[in-house]
Image: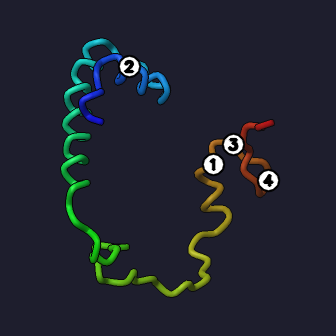
Amino acid sequence: MSNNIDENMVARIAKLSRLELSKEKIAEYTPQLVNILAYMDTLSVVDTENVEPLYSPVDESTFLREDIVAKDYSREEILSNAPEKEGEFFVVPRIV
């Protein structure tokens, strides 16, 4: 697969990805993409027949804090940072 990568292919991939690349960047990225795909070809020959899938490289579980409801700030403190407010509410641009 990596042998078929040329500057035209990189330009096409960029266009499909909605990226605007200069000719210099296309020339720079072409050998990088060839090297990445060549490495993937190398990995594809590794025998993984009897290897268990690894879902996470970390054995530790995620430590979660206890969810405690707390009122840390008053409404006045929060609204004091608002660029625009009306009574007890934030004023935000209308989005339709």
Disc 4 or 1, which lies upstream in sequence? 1
Residue under circle 1? 82
In front: 33, or 38? 38
Q: Relative to 76, say whether 60 is above or below.
A: below
Helix, strand or loop status at disc 1: loop
Give the number of the disc on residue 87. 4
Residue 29 in the image: above or below residue 40: above
Taking 34 as reference, is 15 left or right? right
Q: Which residue is mark 3?
A: 84
Secondary structure, mark 3, is: loop
Q: Which mark is residue 11?
A: 2
Is there CB contact under 8 Å for labels 1 and 2?
no
Type of amino acid at the residue the image marks with label 1: Ala
Q: Quadrant of the C terminus?
A: top right
Identify the amino acid type marked 2: Ala
Q: Position of residue 6 (x, y in %)?
A: 28, 21
Cα separation, mark 2 vs mark 4, equals 54 Å
CA gap, disc 3 and disc 1: 5 Å
Return the disc, 2 or 4, that comes first in the chain's sequence.
Answer: 2
Under mark 4, the amino acid is Gly
Q: Position of residue 62 (x, y in %)?
A: 39, 80
Pointer 2 and pointer 4: residues touching (CB < 8 Å)?
A: no
Tag count: 4
